[in-house]
Structures are given as structure tokens and as C-alpha cells.
Image: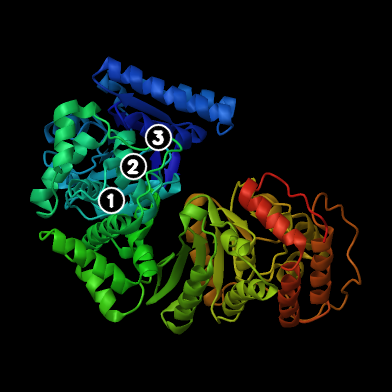
């Protein structure tokens, strides 16, 4: 068996290096390969490193088993699928090999020379280098086209971002496959241009350098600057704590020294970093706050630390954008997810782009070699915020100068949940589809293998303070759905994963829905579990699509359905395997637009045989007050036109926003998660 993605099969993956990150990479591959019967081999010349790596991996599997993340049988299968060996011959037959050795260009060259002679000609070779350019790493290879950098981030089995860095000779088809492959196995692959350090590590190391320089200037101690940086930059841990956790001080010292020559003179290993390494070696630790300890700095000194950190951070970030290493949208996502901190455009927009520029200029004045990025200067001159897209759009040609627009919702950190910005961007995207004569229709899908759209933005719902605010939020969904229905061109929803709540309501407005085959759970309207109702058109479109009785059951119980049931209900029209989902969706759009296929649309008129009441139903713990209003919305819609029903649904949602149970349900979800039922008071 093998994992088939993008026309390539992967049944065996090799990892070279059992040090800091190799075992973590192996664990992630085991998780995704084991269900397909695949195997993973970790090779190292050091028996001691192999023992440590195997112990580390086993500890993480055991922890996952204890927490319930891994079922015992799956944990056992992972253990059986991973081999640790000193024998490079065990790599033979691997379809993909990731080198995770130390940052030594000569060592990497020897490893890849061996791999090229040992593996089949179509095996893909990757280096998990954190800094070195692919052109240097793979200089000795005969076939450079199959080689690229795939830079993971700590911890590699959980941090989803992977920088894909092709070299000048990397085959574009290999790059394209790597992006599809890593997305399919649950990562967020971002293509980055070849430059020393790539796109993200210069941020990690640059923030650390700036923090050191602030300490050296006397504004604060290591402990103080580390603590202040968390709030100033929206970091989970401060830059000095991050160095302690990753053991990154030695490689950062080397990286900054190299960046001084390869990127710019403002990069340099700080004096206090050199002193730490001279006095304590690679084991040196920075003095930071312990658990529960604080080191807040008030007054002008605290403000100066905050401003300095932000000025340095924004300047470093936008220099990378200036360099053209990746798109602004990709870069924003990379910083938010890989480093788990406030990304630059969001920070600049919140501060005001003019103020952000002032902070960078102030830092540059204090550090004359530091550049003021043109991207930030140009945006400040425009006098408006940065516009970062939550969508990835691509035209897929279908011949005769015609194309299908692929629109992907990309908010992987929240499983592609819909917020106000995303609604606005989707409306703009579909308006472009309607205007473009060369585009015959669109495929709407989500990013990654987990979710089409997981629902609406819970934080927005949690912040509701009035029925009017609730109606305004719901109206965004109504306007988008109505736009799609009236587009004049077919729109196919390709449900690549969960379509819950507002995600399913969005799909209901599309011409056709295609589900991912083999999903135990693919769709549902769980709003009643939160003390609200589907207010994006769900109470109106679902009964017209699958029938009153079946729709009422799903709406009132929040019960999810799997792929087969969704097909039987008529919720989806077709099912497709993951590697064919988009191709099938594009084909359906092409056939619909050419008149070769017809899909009857649900009636928008009042139902002639609309029931006067709904069948009795056990709704369990759910709110009886919410259920009564939900039933009212369903019944009203059946006896009126779709447009009238949709307007009534908004009015009902406003009334629900005034219920005590709405607050009970939302607060419970935010505080306790979806697996803990709310205790409703039925009013």
C-alpha cells in the first residue's frame, strides 16, 4: 500500500539524522503513512543518537496514547512502522528522504552523494536545513531537479509550517508536488525563494538579536526584555525563552554571522550571545522568568522596550517582503503559525501603518545599518491598511481560452472558519468571477485536508452584545449566499473536509456539492449545541434541498453526517477521493457551464404541502427556547418564498441573541470546548 498524492506514491520515507528534529519528522510521517501501510526509517551513524531519538519518539507516542490522541492499536502500529538503524542500506526503496543532519555543508554533500547512488532515480531528496541555500547543498548532485529544502519548525510533528525552498535547478513539477504533498499530509507548505536563512528564521533570529541589543543598550535586563516581548509582539514565549527551549543559541550565533555577509550588515551576533557561548558553551541558558513569574516594566522604559521591539520586528519582516522571497499573504501566515506570534501586517494595521513606519525609522536611526523597507514606506504613503487575503485563487484552464476559478479559503489555524474579512473577500472574489468572460464558473473549497469550513468565527459570536449585532453578522452570510445563487455561473463546493455550521450553509448556496469519499463525518449544523440556530440560510435552504423531516432532524439535533449519508440524503451530489476531488469539481463546472449537465435547483417558492407543525423530536440537553424559535423559522420558510424565509431567519436569530441560553451556550463552548454539553436554562 502507499499514500497516493499528485500522481506519486509514497510508501517509505527515510530520515537521515536522529538528533534534535529528525525523530519528530519521523513521528509526523508515521502518523500519516501508517493508515496507508507505509513505513519510516531513521538512519544515523551514531548508535547513541539513535537510542536518544528512539526514546524521544517513544515518549511522544506514549504521551499521545495516554491523552487519547492515539488509540492503542494505532500507537502500536506506529511503533512497528518506524525503524532506527545505523545501516544506510535500510534507506533503499525509499520514495522520499529528508536529511536532518547538522548545518554542515560538507556533511550534507556527503549524505546526498550517498543517497543519489543508493535510491531510485525518481526518489525525492529533501534537506531540512534551516539556513543553507539549496544551490549550495545540492551542488554535487547529478540530478538536482529532484532536490529541494523542506525546512520544518519546532516541534516538527506539531508545528504545521514547512518552508519549501526550491533551488535554481529544482524541477518545477517537483516543487508543485511537494506543495500538494505536504498540504495533503496536514502541513502548511509555503514556497520560499532561495536566500540564506529563507523567510522565517531571520525573523526568529532577528527578534532575538534586537532583544539582545535592547539589553546591551541598558533599557532592560534579559528577563525584563524577554517578558515584555511577549505582549509587545504577541508571542507565546519570549525570544530568550525560545532559545532555551530550542537549544538555538549556537546556531543563531552562526546564522547571524553568516547573515551579516549574505543579507545585510545589520545582522550580527550580539555581544551578550558571544559571551554566553564563550562562558557556557552550547549548554548555556538565559535567565528568564519561571512559571508564574513576571517581570513587567512600567513607564517610559517599558514603552521604549516595546517600541524598539516592534520597530525592529516590522523592519526585519518587511525587508523579507522587499526581497521577494514569498508573497505577503504567505508571509503573514508563516509568522502567525510557525512562530505563533502577531504577524507584521496585522500589527502594522493595528498600530496604524504610519505609526509602524515611525517605529521602524526610529530603530533604523539608532542602528544606522538597518534598512527601512520600501514595502512599508509605500503602504504608509497610500494611507491605508495592508490587505492580506484569506483566499488562494487560481484559474484552471479547461480549453478554448476558458477557465474555472479555484477559490480556496485558507485560515488553517481555525480550520478555515469564516469571519467578516473572509466574507468580504469571498464577495469580492465571486464578483470577479461574474465579471470575467474567460471564467465559466468556480470551485469553492478549503485549505488542507481537515476542513472545508469549520463554521463561523466563534470569537465574533462571543463578542455579540445585542440582537442588532447578531443580525449584522448573520447578514454577511446571507449576502454572500445570495450572491453565489445569483451569480449566473455555476459554483461547485468541493468539501475537502468538515463542512460545519456556516461552512455547510455556504455550500448549500452552491450549484453542486461534492463530498470527500470515506469521511466518517463531513457535514453538520451544530449550532443548537451552542444555544443558537443556523442563521446563514440553513433553516431555509436545507429543508428545500433534502426534505422537511430529514432537515428538521439535522437542524434540531445538530447531528453530523458522514459521506455516505450525505450522498443518500442529497446533501452532496457526488463523492470523490481526495486526490481527485478538485479535478471532479472542475469537470462538473465545465459540464454545467457548457449545458452538458443540468442540476435542478431547489424551489424558491412557498411549499404547497408545507406542514403546520414539525414532528415531535427528542432534542436531549439542548435549549427548548432555542428549539421553539428554530421550529418557527423552519415552518415560516416553508410557507413563504425563500427570500421571505431568509429575512425571517435573520429576525429570529436576533431574538435568539437576546436569550440567556445563547450566552450560556457560547460561553460554555469558548471555556470548555465542543465536547462538554452546555447546561441550558431554557430561556
In space, the residues marked 1 and 3 are separated at their CA atoms by: 27 Å
Mark 3 Cα-neighbour bin, 10 Å: few <14, some 14–19, many ≥20: few
Q: Give the side of residue 137 with respect to residue 199, left or right.
A: left
> Under tag 3, what secondary structure?
loop
Measured as percent of width and height from the top left, residue 275 is found at: 15, 34
> Under tag 1, what secondary structure?
loop
In space, the residues marked 2 and 1 are separated at their CA atoms by: 9 Å
Q: Give the side of residue 562 with respect to residue 373, left or right.
A: right
**In front of the other: label 2 or label 3?**
3
Is 82 above or below relative to 133? Answer: above
**What residue is shown with label 2?**
153
Q: 491 or 646: which is nearer to us?
A: 646
**What residue is shown with label 3?**
290
In space, the residues marked 2 and 3 are separated at their CA atoms by: 24 Å
The image quadrant of residue 244 is: top left
Q: Which mark is residue 200?
A: 1
Quadrant of the image containing the C terminus: bottom right
Q: 475 or 571: which is nearer to us?
A: 475
> Under tag 2, what secondary structure?
loop
Amino acid at each position: 500500500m502507499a499514500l497516493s498524492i499528485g500522481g506519486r506514491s509514497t510508501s517509505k520515507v527515510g530520515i537521515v539524522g536522529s538528533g534534535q528534529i529528525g525523530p519528530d519528522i519521523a513521528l509526523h510521517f508515521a502518523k500519516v503513512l501508517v493508515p496507508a501501510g507505509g513505513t519510516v526509517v531513521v538512519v544515523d551513524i551514531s548508535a547513541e543518537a539513535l537510542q536518544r531519538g528512539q526514546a524521544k519518539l517513544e515518549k511522544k507516542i506514549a504521551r499521545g496514547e495516554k491523552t487519547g490522541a492515539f488509540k492503542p492499536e494505532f500507537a502500536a502500529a506506529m511503533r512497528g512502522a518506524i525503524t532506527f538503524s545505523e545501516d544506510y542500506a535500510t534507506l533503499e526503496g525509499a520514495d522520499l528522504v529528508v536529511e536532518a543532519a547538522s548545518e554542515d555543508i560538507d556533511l550534507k554533500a556527503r549524505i546526498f552523494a550517498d543517497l543519489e547512488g543508493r535510491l531510485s532515480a525518481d526518489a525525492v531528496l529533501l534537506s531540512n536545513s534551516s539556513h543553507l541555500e539549496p544551490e549550495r547543498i545540492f551542488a554535487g548532485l547529478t540530478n538536482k531537479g529532484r532536490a529541494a529544502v523542506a525546512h520544518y519548525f519546532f516541534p516538527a510533528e506539531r508545528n504545521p509550517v514547512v518552508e519549501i525552498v526550491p533551488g535554481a535547478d529544482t524541477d518545477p513539477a517537483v516543487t508543485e508536488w511537494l506543495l500538494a504533498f505536504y498540504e495533503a499530509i496536514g502541513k502548511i507548505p509555503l514556497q520560499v525563494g532561495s536566500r540564506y536563512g529563507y523567510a522565517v528564521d531571520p525573523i526568529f533570529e532577528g527578534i532575538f538579536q534586537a532583544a539582545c541589543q535592547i539589553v546591551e543598550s541598558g533599557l532592560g535586563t534579559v528577563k525584563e526584555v524577554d517578558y515584555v516581548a511577549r505582549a509587545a509582539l504577541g508571542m507565546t514565549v519570549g525570544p530568550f525563552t525560545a532559545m532555551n527551549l530550542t537549544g538555538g543559541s549556537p546556531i543563531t550565533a552562526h546564522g547571524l554571522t553568516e547573515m551579516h555577509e549574505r543579507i545585510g550588515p545589520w545582522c550580527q551576533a550580539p555581544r551578550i550571545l558571544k559571551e554566553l557561548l564563550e562562558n557556557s558553551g552550547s549548554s548555556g541558558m538565559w535567565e528568564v522568568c519561571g512559571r508564574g513569574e513576571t517581570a513587567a516594566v512600567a513607564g517610559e522604559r517599558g514603552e521604549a522596550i516595546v517600541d524598539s521591539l516592534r520597530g525592529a520586528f516590522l523592519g526585519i519582516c518587511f525587508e523579507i517582503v522587499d526581497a521577494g522571497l514569498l508573497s505577503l499573504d504567505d508571509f503573514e501566515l508563516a509568522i502567525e503559525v510557525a512562530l505563533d506570534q502577531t504577524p507584521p501586517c496585522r500589527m502594522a494595521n493595528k498600530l496604524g501603518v504610519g505609526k509602524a513606519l515611525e517605529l521602524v525609522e526610529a530603530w533604523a536611526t539608532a542602528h544606522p545599518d538597518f534598512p527601512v523597507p520600501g514595502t512599508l514606506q509605500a503602504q504608509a504613503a497610500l494611507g491605508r491598511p495592508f490587505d492580506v487575503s484569506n483566499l488562494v485563487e487560481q484559474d484552471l484552464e479547461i480549453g478554448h481560452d476558458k477557465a474555472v476559478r479555484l477559490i480556496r479559503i485558507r485560515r488553517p489555524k481555525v480550520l478555515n472558519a469564516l469571519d467578516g474579512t473572509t466574507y468580504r473577500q469571498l464577495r469580492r472574489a465571486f464578483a470577479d468571477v461574474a465579471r470575467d468572460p474567460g471564467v465559466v464558473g468556480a470551485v469553492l473549497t478549503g485549505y488542507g485536508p481537515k476542513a472545508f469550513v469549520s463554521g463561523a468565527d466563534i470569537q465574533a459570536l462571543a463578542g455579540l452584545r445585542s440582537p442588532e449585532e447578531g443580525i449584522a453578522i448573520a447578514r454577511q452570510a446571507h449576502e454572500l449566499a445570495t450572491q453565489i445563487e445569483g451569480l449566473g455561473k455555476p459554483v461547485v463546493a468541493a468539501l475537502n473536509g468538515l463542512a460545519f455550521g456556516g461552512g455547510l450553509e455556504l455550500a448549500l448556496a452552491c450549484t453542486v456539492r461534492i463530498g470527500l469519499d470515506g469521511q466518517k463525518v463531513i457535514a453538520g449544523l451544530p449550532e443548537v449545541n451552542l444555544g443558537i440556530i443556523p442563521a446563514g440560510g440553513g433553516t431555509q435552504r436545507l429543508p428545500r434541498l433534502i426534505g422537511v423531516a430529514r432537515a428538521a432532524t439535522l437542524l434540531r439535533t445538530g447531528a453530523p453526517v458522514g459521506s455516505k449519508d450525505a450522498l443518500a440524503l442529497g446533501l452532496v451530489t457526488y463523492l470523490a477521493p481526495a486526490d481527485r476531488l478538485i479535478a471532479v469539481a472542475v469537470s462538473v463546472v465545465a459540464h454545467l457551464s457548457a449545458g452538458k449537465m443540468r442540476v435542478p435547483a431547489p424551489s424558491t417558492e412557498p411549499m404547497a404541502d408545507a406542514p403546520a407543525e414539525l414532528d415531535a423530536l427528542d432534542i436531549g440537553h439542548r435549549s427548548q427556547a432555542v428549539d421553539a424559535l428554530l421550529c418557527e423559522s423552519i415552518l415560516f420558510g416553508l410557507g413563504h418564498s425563500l427570500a421571505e424565509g431568509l429575512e425571517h431567519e435573520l429576525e429570529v436569530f436576533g431574538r435568539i441573541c437576546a436569550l440567556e441560553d445563547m450566552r450560556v451556550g457560547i460561553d460554555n463552548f469558548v471555556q470548555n470546548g465542543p465536547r462538554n454539553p452546555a447546561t441550558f436554562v431554557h430561556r
